[in-house]
Image: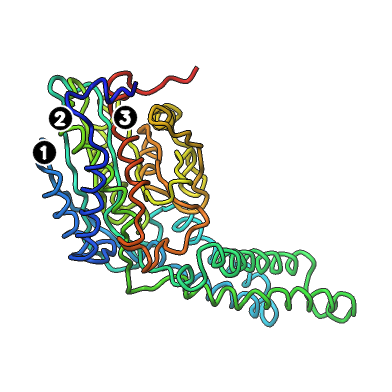
Amino acid sequence: MKIAEEYSKKKIDIEKNTEYAVKGITKICKKIGPRKPGSLEEFRAQQWMQRDIKNYCDKTEIESFALHRQGFMGFIPFTVACGVASVFINWFVSPIAALVLCVLAFIPLLFEFLMYKQFDDFLFPKQTSHNMIATRKAKGEIKQRIILIGHSDSQFEWTLNYHLGGLQAKLFVEIPAVVGLVIQTIFALVCIIVGKGDAAMDIDSARGFFIALFVISCVFIPFEVAFLFFQSWTKSVPGASDNLSGCYAGMAAIKALDEAEIEFENTDVIMICSGSEEAGLRGAKAYVRDHEKELKKIPTVAIGIDTFRDLEDMAVYDRDLSGTVRHDWGAKNLIKNAAANCGYDLPFASIYIGGCDAAAFTQRGIKATGFAAMNPDPPRYYHTRLDTPENLRPEAISAGIEILCEAICMYDKKGLPEQK
């Protein structure tokens, strides 16, 4: 028997709350539309969700934070320019100068896109973004806390994903572009180490070797130039699955518990609809930064809920933030065990490129994990205009709601599983 059923005084109506979630997602997409990070539309959606959830919580609030939304992907033209220029600087000017350009190209790619550091944000205009926070308080003394967090913003359209498909864009543009930059860096290093001087170039075999390196480096230039069209800089997408489905799955879980008259004596349940996740987890990072002391006063676990669409790919995230962060053993097994109680055998998976809001908590030493149902290829709807309410799969949202209800009740009863 599920723990949630032991707790409930009335039936936990997953079907009814799935309908609530789908209806809410559809209304926001139709009435408000795309919600780029730090936009008025993002804020209006959070206000809408605040009105939706306030009847099932004790407290709701919206907190603001500063944002530089183009900092996250704004490095792309700079990186491409450095990579392409390095090929010709290496051949006609100096391999040392070319190596410097390659290193400069890699720095923002590594720190901003792969590690989500706020590395070059100060170079871009500032906006104001927000987090919507809904709290269902414990009846008695607060001894522990569980946080569900999904993001309410939507990404600028990934143009290559839309025109080529996610897997094809990755294989035929994105990976070759990065490989090209690596090869151009190696080309510069080889020229420095071997010595691409006039004496070496007078030797036919050496000249042929350097020409071959130059030609190979040039072959990858079109892929790097194509990377300039990776995303739109102005048009954001509907974001129905990514990630209104996560927001509404969490909100529907809290609503379902309230309607079933499930109350917790010592556990606070918090739902955060974060802002600007698509700009590098900025909302989650701001929340943890501003609330770190209170989060660490009592046992706290955070569940990043992101995109409930591809049920066959539903998983618990073990590694996050481009594989650089490992989530807490107890947190990830809480979700895995809750899923098992609901009849799902979920694997552990990793986010090798990108991240979810849970990573912001893990980085600050707060136990967390990610939970989602999304094809990792990624699918063609991912970050494109195809991510509409018509493309939702309610059965995936339903599974997310059911598992979250069970996980919350399990956490209240037993806390996090302990590693033996």
Disc nearer the start of the sequence (2/3) = 2
- Which one is in front, 399 or 410? 399
Where 80 falls versus 333 (above or below)?
A: below
Q: In this rendering, which labeled residue sits more in front, label 3 or label 1?
A: 3
The residue wearing badge 1 is: 59
At label 1, the amino acid type is: Lys
The residue wearing badge 2 is: 137
Badge 3 vs badge 1, beta-carbon distance below 8 Å: no
At label 3, the amino acid type is: Glu
Where 152 falls versus 339 (above or below)?
A: below
At label 2, the amino acid type is: Lys
Mark 3–mark 1 Cα distance, whole angstroms, equals 22 Å
Where 414 falls versus 24 (above or below)?
A: above
User: For the N terminus, which image quadrant?
Assistant: top left
- Where residue 17 appears, x then y in whole percent? 23, 43
Image disc number at residue 138: none
Where 74 falls versus 242 (above or below)?
A: below
Task: Tell me the residue at 27%/36% (across/down).
Answer: 147
Task: Tell me the residue at 59%/74% (across/down).
Answer: 223
Taking the image as shown, residue 33 lies to the left or right of residue 228, namely left
Mark 1–mark 2 Cα distance, whole angstroms, equals 8 Å
- Where residue 318 appears, x then y in whole percent? 48, 38
Badge 2 vs badge 3, beta-carbon distance below 8 Å: no
